Image: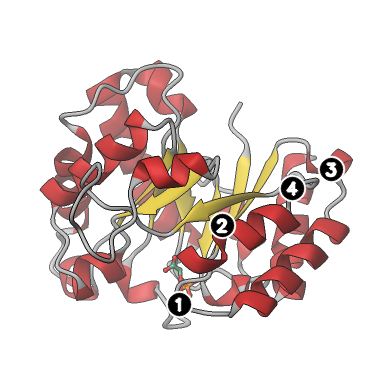
Amino acid sequence: MRDIIIAGNWKMNKDWAGSREFCSLLAEQLAPAALQGVRVIVAPPFPFLDIARQALEHSPARISAQDISSHTDGAYTGEVSAAMLASLNMPYCIVGHSERRQYHHEDGSLINQKLQRLLEQQIIPILCIGETLQEREAGQTQEILQNQLSEALDALQISQGTDIVIAYEPVWAIGTGRTATAQMAQDAHAFVRSWLSKRFGAEVASQIHILYGGSMKPENIAELIAQEDIDGGLIGGASLKLNDFMAMIHSAIAQKSK
Ligand code: PGA
């Protein structure tokens, strides 16, 4: 049985004090007993990972980095390696977000290398995939998803016990207020799971968490996570306010107890 994952992607928002305050209040408000089957993750910017980790130390919430270098170590000014994250006991790291693909021209082979670095350090990757509006309107959604999955994952050994999370984030829904309908999202998730099943086997595919991302908020989360193949959300804008983030965690708890 898969968990429901509620992951907040802060992107380039908040400062040191704001990160500490958010995480301390989150720790206070999370009741561990109620979280059965729900995983809570926050992904602050690099400089605030450690303070977030400290503030969440005695809570069930976990932290994630937002990106990682494709190199192991060496002369790469400005880069952060998977081994560095591992030294902070980092459980998760987002990789291949559409903003990285778009603004930093990350391609499938680079994303594959980043995934390898994370798996070498036992950090769980949250791999983002998704089509643009133009691609959806041209009827290319499945082709794009298939290409992105295959470029990122084909060369990897994924077997039972390899923890990896996929986030389906239609680019046209990110930060736009425009959300995929629950049916559109479910169709894309079912397609991703069937690809995973063909590539790695039904058992492995049934264990992989597939999150939806793109203008997810308290008002639309319940319908989305009620879908069979939607195992939670990677949430940007609506994860920055603690009240909204808590409301979405409560929706996940309600869904789990159905
Ligand atoms: P959004 O971002 O919730 O602000 O649309 C989601 C994401 O990019 O992960």
The image position of residue 177, as x and y in percent, is: 48, 82
Q: Which residue is mark 1?
A: 12
In front: label 3 or label 2:
3
In front: label 2 or label 4:
4
Q: CA distance from mark 1 to mark 3?
A: 29 Å
Q: Quadrant of residue 249?
A: bottom right
Which of the two discs, 1 and 3, labels the residue nearer the N terminus? 1
Q: CA distance from mark 1 to mark 4?
A: 23 Å
- Mark 1: secondary structure: loop
The image position of residue 71, as x and y in percent, is: 21, 46
In front: label 3 or label 4:
4
What's the residue type where badge 3 is placed? Pro
Q: Which residue is mark 3?
A: 32
Question: From where the camera sits, is residue 37 visible?
Answer: yes
- Mark 2 and mark 4 residues within 8 Å of each other at the beta carbon: no
What's the residue type where badge 4 is placed? Glu
Residue for point 39% across, 73% down: 173
Q: CA distance from mark 2 to mark 4?
A: 30 Å
- Picture quarter with the N terminus: top right
- Mark 2: secondary structure: helix
Q: Which mark is residue 57?
A: 4
The image position of residue 16, as x and y in percent, is: 62, 75
Q: Is residue 27 above or below residue 78?
A: above
Q: Is residue 206 above or below residue 44?
A: above
Q: Which residue is mark 2?
A: 224
Bin the neighbour count of mark 4 within 10 Å (Cα to Cα): few under 14, some 14-19, many 20 and up. some
In front: label 1 or label 3:
1
- Mark 1 and mark 2 residues within 8 Å of each other at the beta carbon: no
